[in-house]
Amino acid sequence: MEADQIDVDAREGWVVLVRGAAHHLHTEAERAPFIDAGLEPWIEGVPAHFIRVTPASIWGQPHPPGVCQALAQAQAQAADVG
């Protein structure tokens, strides 16, 4: 799993990679603890799929300011297209 977080105003961000075994949460009982967590699909209109990752390793690093600006511009362009 990869998660990127960018604060456009502060011109900073992080990339975090988590490696490990992934398990699709099929049942309502498995998904119940996450339903009210405020999680949303990245692509509007796509049904939510919940995947639990049991981490074997976690790695992260900050994005340099120039990368953050480029990613923010790419996100804005994608929003205009979508």
Image (tube, rainbow, N blue to C red):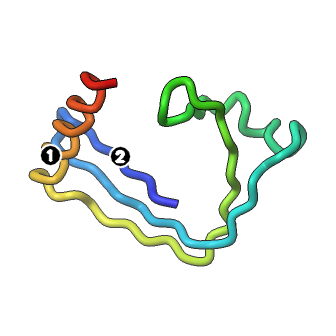
Q: Nearer the viewer, mark 1 or mark 2?
A: 1
Q: Which mark is residue 70?
A: 1
Ranked by sequence position, the earlier of labels 1 and 2 is 2
Q: CA distance from mark 1 to mark 2?
A: 13 Å
Residue at 44 percent across and 53 percent down: it is 3
* 40 sits to left or right of 64: right
Q: Amino acid at mark 2?
A: Gln
Q: Quadrant of residue 76?
A: top left
Which residue bears the numbered disc 2? Answer: 5
Residue drawn where x is 60% and y is 29% of the image:
38
Residue 71 spot, x, y in % from top left: 21, 45
Specify few, some or many for label 2: CA neighbours under 10 Å numbering under 14, 14-19, or 20 or more: few
- Along the line of sight, which residue is nearer the eye, 6 or 26? 26
Identify which residue, 7 or 31, lies in the foreground.
Answer: 31
Query: Helix, strand or loop at disc 2?
Result: strand
Give the number of marks.
2
Provide residue 13's location: percent of width, then percent of height: 27, 50
Residue 28 in the image: x percent, y percent? Answer: 87, 37
For image coordinates 16% across by 43% down, the residue present is: 11
Q: Amino acid at mark 1?
A: Ala
Residue depicted at x 90% and y 40%: 29
Q: Residue 24's image quarter?
A: bottom right
User: In the image, 28: left or right of 6?
Assistant: right
Q: Secondary structure at mark 1?
A: helix
In the rendered structure, find residue 38 and report the number of the disc placed on it: none
